[in-house]
Structures are given as structure tokens and as C-alpha cells.
Amino acid sequence: MRWALVKVCLAVTAMVVVAFAVPLGLVVRELARDRAFSNAEREAAAVAPALSITTDRDKLERVVAAAGADRGMAVHIPAAGGQAAVDIGRQRAADRDIAAVRRLGRASTAGVGGGSTLLQPVALSSGAIAVVEVYVPESEVTNGVGAAWAVLAAVGLALIVGSVAVADRLGVRMVRPARRLVEGAHELGEGKLGARVPEEGPNELRLAAVAFNSMADQVVQLLANERELAADLSHRLRTPLTVLRLNAASLGEGTAAEQTRAAVAQLEREVDTIIRTAREAKPQTAAAGPGAGCDAAEVVRERMGFWSALAEDEGRKWRLAGVDRPVRIPVARADLAAALDALLGNVFRHTAEGTAFAVDVHNAEDAVIVLVSDAGQGIRDPEAAMARGRGSGTAGSTGLGLDIVRRLAESTGGDVRIGSSVLGGTEVRIWIQLDGGKPERRGHRGPVRRRRSRGQPGDTARRGSERIGLDL
């Protein structure tokens, strides 16, 4: 494209220069010729008054010498009235040319060696026609023409060079964005998802760059969503895997029991591998549309019914409050169930058997708060635990459980906080915004730290308002 544009500009400029420079050069040459013959006519006119008065040779020689003998002037007087013909100066024109001028009675030019001659007829007092011959050398006819043509050629060459330079710069301005667009497409095709194109250049290429960058962002987002979905679905398998692991642990001894436990362990490792492979994806959770959502109380009761069986097997005391009436939230049922399974799975995975836990649901005017508390050892670094993909550092932890919970809350404009529960362990607070607005800052920084209270899991509901006040 660049060289094509240069060639087009070169051809167009060359044609324009030729179209204007050639006629202008011819005009300059004609002007120089007219100037030379005009001077010759003036010199011939200076002799004409003397010829009309006298034909004396001596007087005419003085007049010719004064008028321009150095230019090669000559006077030819024909014989008349018994007077012989008089020729003054060097004759260069042919006799037939002089006779033709005398016969026609008008000025004429004739070519001679080294230039041209101007033949000017002059009427004498005797009625005869004398001819004044003025020699015009070729150097005078072309005087200044060469310099003028050189200037025209230089100007034309400068115009051509300038047009080529401008065309080259325009070509670079057009080709460079196109080349970057091609390079960006190759990089994106090679898997370099961070490839982007500068949005510069002509308007069309700038729009193409904007479209390319938008497409690249969408591709990255689609890939991230796919990895996110793979990670979330894989993490949801942890709940049935936990059941299988607990059931396999109660099978006792024997070959079949050992094979079952080995298969469950292998399955857990495979699921962990899938989660770790996909955990680099950027989180994205779309807010639920109008009319979508679920009954949080119903979902909590359902999931607690599932986990209560495992709690009885491990001798855990548990407490459920705030689910005696419907609580509508703008969250899909499956997403809320996955978030609860992630939190309760963490309780069973990271606390010792027999550790008590509780789930409370608090319905406010603009938000619904779900509290999951346990009486375990707590989390030493809540901020690190909220970082996606870090996990707790223990075997089998992928760090996506809390990330699933966080994305669910942020999809409604809420947030997630980790603090110390009244049971002495960890409390995870899920703030689900009902109006879909942005989460409000509740007046504290970082995880919630509260004074521990002595009490049983049954005290959770009675201290619900106190916890809410401290969290907010």
C-alpha cells in the first residue's frame, strides 16, 4: 500500500509538472525571441529617418555606425535615377530575401548562419525601397532561456520529490496501523491474549483497531468465563466428594474399602487439578435479571438438611435461624446453593470433628445477610483467604470457595466479610443487596473483630442484632 501510494503520487505529480512546465518553457523561449527581434526593430527604426533624408554613403555609414554596427547592421539601397546601388555593412541575408522584402514592402526575417536577420523596408525620397538588415545572433535569441528552463526543472523536481515524501509519510501513517493490526491478529491467534492494537491512524483504521481491541476483550472474557465455569462446576463436585470421603472412611477395613477410599482420593485430586488449572480466570458474575432470584430461606433449609446428616455422623452441633419465613433475593437458586455448599464444606474440611457451626439469615429492608459461623480455630489472615486461588494452604484447598461466595454477593452489589464469630471461630458474612446497588462501606476496615462471648450455638439467634450492628 505504501509503495502503491508513492507511485500514484509520483505519476500524478510528474504529469502535472510536465503539463505546466513544458508550455511555460516554450513561452519563455518565445518571449526571449520576441525580445531579441524587438531590439533589432528599434535599431532598424533608428536608421529609417536618415534614409528618408539622404542616400549619401558617408553620412549613412556614420548613422549606421552610431545605430549599431556592432550588431551587424547593414543597409541596402537599390540603384535609381542613374545612381548606383549602395550597400553599407556586411550582407548576411540572401539577395532573393532582400528582393522579396523590397517587393512586398513589409518586414521579414531570414535564417542565416549563427542566427537570423531582420529585414526592414524603408521608403526613400526618390520612391525606391531600401532594406535595413539587422543581424540577430542565436545567443541573443536564447539569452536567459536556459536559466529559465533550469529553474523550471528544479521547481518541477522539487515538487516531485516533495510529493513523493508526503506520499511516503501518508503511506507510513496508513501502513503502520494496518501492520500493527496484522501483528495483533497474529499474536492473538498464537494465544497471546494481552495483544492489543493502538487506536491511531486514519479514521477507518482507527475504527478497525477499536473493533479489534473490543473483539480481543470479548475473547478474553469468554475464555475467562469458560474457565470460571469449569472451576465453579468442579468446585461444586467437592460437596458429593466430601460425602463419599466420609462414607468411605466408615467402611472399615478390607480390599473393597481401600479401593473405594483410593478412588475417592484420586477423584478429589483430579477435581483439584481442574480447579487449579482454571483458577487464573478473571471472575465475572452477571447480576440476576428482573424477576429472577430465589427464596433464600428455602435454599438454606434444603442445604442444611443435606449437611445435617454429615454433622450427625461427626458429632457436630449445629444451629439454623431466620428461615421461618420466605426471604427473596436476586440470586439464582443454584448459585446460592453452591455458595452455601462452599462455606459449609470449608467448615467440615478445615475444622475438627465435633466442632459446632451455625447459619443465620437476617432480612433487612435493603439487604439480606447470611452468616455462617463455626467454633473452630478461625482464620489467621482473612484478607489472604479472600484472595482468589490462594486457598488455606492445606492439602486439597484450591481457594475458589470464598471466591464463589464473593462473586455471588458482588453480583447484587453486596460484599463478603470474614471475622471472628461468637462461637470462637470464623464467621463469614454474605451481604446480598436487594436493590442491585453498589455495596456501601459499613464503617470498618478489613475483617470484623469482636469480643468473644461465652455461649452455645443456640445463642446465635439471640445475638443476631448485636452481630449485625458490629458488622455494619
Image: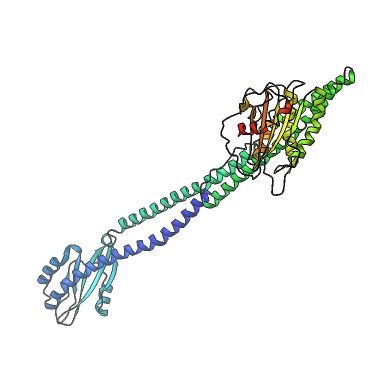
Residue depicted at x 62% and y 38%: 193
Where is residue 260? Give x, y as percent. Answer: 86, 23
Q: Is residue 116 above or below residue 301?
A: below
Q: Is residue 416 above or below residue 178?
A: above
Q: Horizontal placement of 237 versus 154: left or right?
A: right
Residue nearer the viewer, 168 or 237:
237
Residue nearer the viewer, 25 or 263:
263
Q: Is residue 215 visible?
A: yes
Residue found farthest to the top: 253
Residue nearer the viewer, 369 or 62:
369
Where is residue 240? Give x, y as percent. Answer: 80, 30
Q: Horizontal placement of 470 versus 321: left or right?
A: left
Where is residue 318? Give x, y as percent. Answer: 76, 27
Residue depicted at x 48% and y 50%: 170
Q: Quadrant of the C terminus?
A: top right
Residue nearer the viewer, 247 or 369:
369
Residue depicted at x 16% and y 79%: 124
Residue depicted at x 73% and y 26%: 457
